Image (cartoon, grey):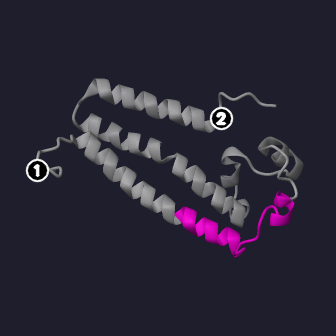
């Protein structure tokens, strides 16, 4: 790999694997986001909440809107296929997928560190994946 001046740029296997995974995940998620957006605005799938209802409640915070309209939150949009087959749920799920890109990239780094027998960085990467998974799961959040 070289830069504009012809100088060599060093990238190790972990960086290349992370970048390749990020490239694949980013492109896939962007396609899903675009598809979800089109499904939502063209109303090709039924909506969980009519657009007029959302527009009529702009003054509410997200938690108030969720409580008032009994909307899904967190991972609950993946709870069942009928729930996921709503235009707004597909759009929401695509954003959730985008937020998971870092975990997928770190998981790729874990594999490379394991193959290279780099135990210190392997443990650090595993801890990062575990912390992100625990944070994403909502286990540590207070319930209301």
| Magenta segment main secondary structure | helix
Is residue 72 depicted above or below 106 in this figure?
Answer: below
Is residue 54 magenta-colored? Answer: yes
N-terminal-most mark, 2 or 1? 1
Residue under the image location 13 percent in, 49 percent down: 5
Q: Depth check: 51 or 104 in front?
A: 51
Is residue 8 magenta-colored? Answer: no
Is residue 127 depicted above or below 52 in this figure?
Answer: above
Badge 2 element: loop
- Which range of residues does the magenta coloring cover? 32-55
* Observer able to see residue 50: no
* Observer able to see residue 103: yes
Is residue 60 depicted above or below 138 in this figure?
Answer: below
Badge 1 element: loop
Residue 91: quarter of image: bottom right
* Horizontal side, residue 20 vs residue 30: left or right: left
- What label sits on residue 6 in the rendered view? 1
Residue 86: quarter of image: bottom right
From the image, tell me which residue sits under label 2. Answer: 138
* Horizontal side, residue 117 vs residue 34: left or right: left
Is residue 67 depicted above or below 89 in this figure?
Answer: above
Q: x and y percent of residue 38 in the render?
A: 62, 71
């Amino acid at each position: 790999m070289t830069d504009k001046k012809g100088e060599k740029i060093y990238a190790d296997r972990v960086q290349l694997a992370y970048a390749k995974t990020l490239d694949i995940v980013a492109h896939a998620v962007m396609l899903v986001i675009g598809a979800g957006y089109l499904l939502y605005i063209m109303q090709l799938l039924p909506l969980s909440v009519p657009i007029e209802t959302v527009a009529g409640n702009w003054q509410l915070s997200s938690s108030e809107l969720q409580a008032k309209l009994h909307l899904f939150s967190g991972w609950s949009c993946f709870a069942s296929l009928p729930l996921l087959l709503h235009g707004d749920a597909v759009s929401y799920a695509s954003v959730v997928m985008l937020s998971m890109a870092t975990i997928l990239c770190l998981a790729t780094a874990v594999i490379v560190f394991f193959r290279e027998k780099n135990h210190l960085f392997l443990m650090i990467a595993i801890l990062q994946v575990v912390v992100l998974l625990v944070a994403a799961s909502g286990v540590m959040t207070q319930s209301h």
